[in-house]
Image (tube, helix red, strand yellow):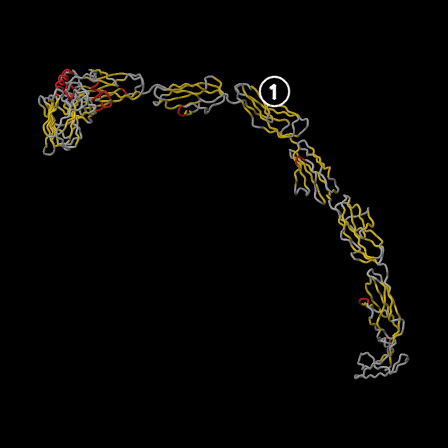
């Protein structure tokens, strides 16, 4: 519902300010359409009256208002100020018609009285500018139409512009640019009908000669039979018109109930006196409704309302305008705008292109269209349990909740009003291949290798929707179709499978081409028998240099390797091939391994000696530089070698002496005997092992052979008697290899003769003596010589004071001679303690008392 009162007249004087939304009711637009929208004035004289008056007006301003171009007529006058002012003078008659294309005339502003001339050089208007009390006073006068008195104008403008035209008021329109500053202006306008209110324009457009909104004012006016007078303090467009208080209220069916497309809608206008509330109706009173085009409303004498009904083919909010003209009875010309809401009651239309109805489908997704007379808002679908949104109502490539087999698909769409459209189809989904299960293998995995083994692989293959079309197996990367079946059990056979890890996958498809495949299966044919390994070379013996030849046999070879230190260090044998050389010097323990691809392992081992060096000989006795008194000597040697000693040879003085070809033991002493002549000889031994390696002790030993005994002859003393006590041993000898000499006197201890030199002093005893002299050579031969002689010395007595327990010679014999038989001597003794004393008589050469005779005291 919309209500409009007289306080807001229209741009034509009666249309309200909401008219600005409809172009045909603008000031300019209405004038252009006035022949269609004929409106009489309050006096009912229509355009005839207006045209008569306008002719009178235009005859007064022929050059101003009839000149098509906008070239102004300039009147020279005194120019005082620099302020530009535009004053638009519009003389508009209340005729119901509007004249368009009014030219703008520019005049000079200067003090004094001036005239404005038309095309025929006749005076159409006068104006006077003079200096006032508080600024310039300006008065513009046009006879029979009115004049304007401006007091206290500021700024001293230099130019003024004048424009004229017609409009639907009971006075001309006078307009002055709002930028003019002044104290007050008195406006006098000729009236052509009843006037009780002053209206002003808020937003006058000089170029288009139009007003965006006319507003009724409370300005006081003085009226007589021909003119009205009123005063303003600022300029816009002013005019006089009728201002009875009226009210306009509008509404429609949609204000109280929902109205949809193609439903009849009633529109109501209540045009009443604002004071009494009574309906305004009578001759010349009418209301029209516009939905872009004016339609006459019907007066309902029962409801006392102006009514109109229509329908809308599309939903939406539509603006509608009601104009009520009561000017014939002195009421305002009111206009108001309202809206009607037409609801959308049409459901969207949904069409499903995919899946096709009642079909078998292998692909998933929804292709559909959803259309609406307004706009589709949201889309979703359902398979019977819950809804799934379709973002932006776009097609999808997969359907959530879709099941293999029968499906009922419903696709929905709603519009912004909430109307829902739906379409459904039934289809059968078969997008999966046959089911492959219960895989079995015979023998079971892993299987032992047998040369003629038969293998069978089985799978149970079914399809719930349709028959299985074809089955094949991919075995080790190659497809095989030689499959046979018993019902749903499919079998594939193989024989003589090699030892290896085999792979396979079952495939099956249905009549729609849906394929299913199992995961990659592994089937192992394994070898539990280790490889046969045999070493042909080397054998358990010694070698100078040798190859390794072996045999390794298995169904599925893996690798071979060997070790010479029991696996601490292993060496691979590429391609399990033989070696041209193996082992290190000395003893070797060879371990040879081989495994197969299953991991079975076997080993063979053998010991051998690698001998590239001749025997080492350690020479024993005789020692180096040794002497031998025999011409026949035994030579000792010990040979060392990794191999068996084949033979050894005794080499004397760099010449072969003899060879020992048997019973030679390595590591122990061996002997060979040889006869040698007297002299110095070099001897060594060389040996050869069974491999032909020869070794020689290059450091030969020396042996001296001396079989001759030294010849010794004592020259002094001889077999004689000697009285002198000074004897020296002298001798002669025959010996080349003299070693040492020694003698013994009277069978006593041996005494060495240094350097076997003559002149060794000897002390013989009184009486008979013998002396023996020995000499040996370096070979140990000893020769000797002996002599017997007498030493005749005179005996003597030695006086000796005896003491208790003492022995000694008491007295010497008197004049002893060698031939004395008897010796006289005296013995004196005394003893302080009167003990007994015993005297013994002994020979000089025997001091032992037990050999002496006891003499009486």
**Residue 518 percent coordinates (x, y):** 56, 26
Q: Point out the residue furthest to the left here.
A: 224
Is the residue 135 above or below the residue 482 in the image?
below
Label 1 neighbourhood size at 10 Å, few (<14), some (14-19), many (20+)?
Answer: few
Split into 4 quadrants, where in the image is the C terminus? bottom right
Which residue was labeled with disc 1?
486
Image quarter for residue 692? top right
Location of residue 64 in the rendering, given as x and y in whole percent from the top left corner: 15, 22
Query: Depth check: 220 or 485 in front?
Result: 220
840 on left or right of 7: right
Q: Tell me where residue 794 sits by quadrant.
A: bottom right
Q: From what the image shows, is residue 842 above or below residue 543? A: below
Considering the image in quadrants, where does the N terminus appear?
top left
Residue 839: give x, y in percent of width and height.
Answer: 84, 80
* Secondary element at tag 1: strand
701 or 582, which is in the foreground? 701
Q: Nearer the viewer, residue 520 or 749?
A: 749
Q: Determine if residue 393 is in view.
A: yes
Q: Which residue is located at x 82 percent, y 70 percent? A: 760
The residue sitting at 90% across, 81% down in the picture is: 822
Q: Nearer the viewer, residue 84 or 597?
A: 84
Estimate the x, y position of residue 521 in percent, counting from the top left: 59, 28
Task: For residue 405, say whether it is visible.
Answer: no
């Amino acid at each position: 519902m919309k209500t409009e009162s007289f306080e807001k007249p229209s741009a034509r004087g009666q249309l309200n300010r909401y008219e600005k939304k409809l172009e045909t009711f603008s000031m300019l637009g209405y004038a252009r359409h006035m022949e269609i929208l004929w409106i009489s004035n309050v006096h009912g004289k229509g355009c005839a009256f207006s045209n008569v008056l306008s002719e009178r007006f235009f005859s007064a301003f022929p050059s101003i208002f009839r000149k098509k171009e906008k070239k102004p007529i300039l009147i020279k006058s005194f120019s005082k100020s620099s302020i530009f002012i535009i004053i638009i003078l519009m003389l508009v008659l209340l005729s119901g018609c509007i004249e368009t294309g009014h030219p703008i005339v520019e005049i000079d502003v200067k003090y004094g009285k001036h005239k404005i001339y038309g095309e025929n050089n006749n005076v159409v208007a006068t104006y006077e500018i003079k200096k006032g009390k508080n600024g310039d006073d300006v008065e513009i006068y046009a006879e029979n139409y009115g004049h304007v008195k401006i007091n206290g104008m500021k700024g001293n403008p230099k130019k003024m512009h004048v424009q004229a035209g017609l409009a639907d008021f009971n006075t001309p329109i006078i307009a002055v640019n709002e930028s003019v500053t002044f104290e007050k202006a008195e406006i006098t306008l000729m009236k052509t009908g009843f006037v009780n209110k002053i209206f002003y324009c808020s937003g006058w457009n000089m170029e288009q000669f139009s007003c965006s909104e006319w507003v009724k004012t409370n300005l006081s006016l003085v009226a007589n039979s021909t003119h009205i007078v009123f005063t303003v303090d600022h300029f816009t467009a002013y005019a006089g018109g009728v201002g009875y208080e009226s009210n306009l209220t509008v509404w429609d069916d949609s204000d109280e109930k929902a109205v949809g497309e193609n439903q009849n809608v009633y529109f109501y206008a209540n045009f009443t006196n604002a004071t009494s509330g009574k309906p305004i109706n009578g001759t010349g009173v009418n209301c029209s409704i516009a939905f872009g085009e004016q339609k006459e409303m019907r007066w309902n004498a029962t409801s006392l309302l102006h009514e109109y009904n229509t329908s809308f083919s599309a939903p939406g909010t539509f603006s509608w305008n009601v104009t009520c003209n009561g000017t014939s009875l002195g009421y305002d010309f009111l206009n108001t705008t309202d809206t009607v809401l037409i609801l959308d009651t049409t459901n969207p239309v949904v069409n499903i292109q995919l899946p096709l109805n009642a079909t078998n489908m292998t692909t998933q997704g929804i292709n559909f269209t959803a259309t609406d007379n307004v706009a589709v808002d949201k889309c979703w679908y359902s398979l019977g349990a819950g809804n799934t949104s379709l973002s932006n109502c776009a097609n999808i490539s997969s359907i959530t909740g879709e099941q293999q087999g029968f499906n009922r698909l419903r696709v929905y769409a709603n519009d912004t009003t909430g109307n829902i459209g739906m379409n459904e189809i039934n289809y059968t989904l078969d997008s999966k291949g046959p089911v492959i299960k219960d895989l079995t293998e015979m023998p079971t995995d892993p299987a032992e290798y047998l040369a003629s083994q038969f293998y069978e692989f089985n799978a149970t293959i079914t399809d719930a929707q349709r028959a299985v079309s074809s089955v094949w197996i991919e075995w080790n990367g190659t497809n095989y179709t030689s499959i046979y079946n018993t019902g749903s059990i499919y079998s594939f056979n193989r024989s003589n499978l090699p030892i290896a890890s085999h792979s396979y996958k079952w495939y099956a498809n249905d009549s729609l081409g849906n394929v299913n495949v199992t995961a990659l299966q592994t089937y192992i044919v394994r070898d539990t028998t280790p490889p046969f390994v045999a070493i042909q070379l080397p054998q358990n013996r010694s070698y100078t240099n040798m190859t390794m030849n072996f045999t390794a046999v298995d169904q599925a070879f893996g690798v071979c390797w060997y070790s010479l230190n029991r696996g601490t260090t292993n060496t691979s044998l590429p391609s399990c091939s033989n070696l041209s050389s193996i082992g290190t010097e000395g003893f070797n323990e060879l371990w040879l391994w081989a495994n197969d691809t299953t991991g079975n392992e076997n080993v063979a081992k053998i010991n051998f000696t690698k001998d590239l060096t001749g025997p080492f000989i350690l020479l024993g006795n005789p020692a180096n530089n040794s002497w031998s008194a025999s011409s026949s000597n035994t030579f000792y040697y010990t040979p060392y070698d990794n191999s068996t000693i084949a033979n050894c040879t005794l080499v004397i003085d760099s010449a072969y002496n003899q060879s020992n070809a048997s019973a030679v033991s390595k590591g122990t002493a061996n002997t060979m005997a040889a006869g040698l002549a007297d002299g110095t000889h070099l001897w060594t031994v060389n040996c050869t092992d069974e491999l032909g390696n020869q070794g020689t002790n290059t450091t030969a030993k020396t042996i001296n052979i001396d079989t001759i005994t030294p010849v010794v002859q004592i020259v002094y003393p001889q077999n004689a008697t000697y009285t002198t006590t000074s004897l020296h041993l002298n001798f002669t000898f025959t010996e080349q290899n003299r070693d040492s000499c020694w003698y013994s006197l009277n069978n006593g201890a041996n005494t060495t003769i240094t350097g076997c030199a003559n002149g060794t002093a000897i002390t013989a005893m009184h009486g008979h003596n013998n002396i023996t002299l020995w000499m040996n050579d370096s070979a140990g031969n000893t020769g000797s010589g002996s002599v017997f002689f007498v030493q005749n010395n005179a005996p003597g007595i030695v006086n000796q004071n005896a003491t208790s327990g003492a022995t000694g010679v008491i007295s010497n014999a008197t004049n002893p001679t060698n031939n004395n038989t008897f010796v006289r001597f005296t013995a004196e003794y005394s003893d302080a303690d009167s003990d007994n004393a015993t005297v013994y008589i002994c020979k000089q050469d025997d001091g032992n008392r037990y050999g002496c005779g006891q003499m009486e005291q």
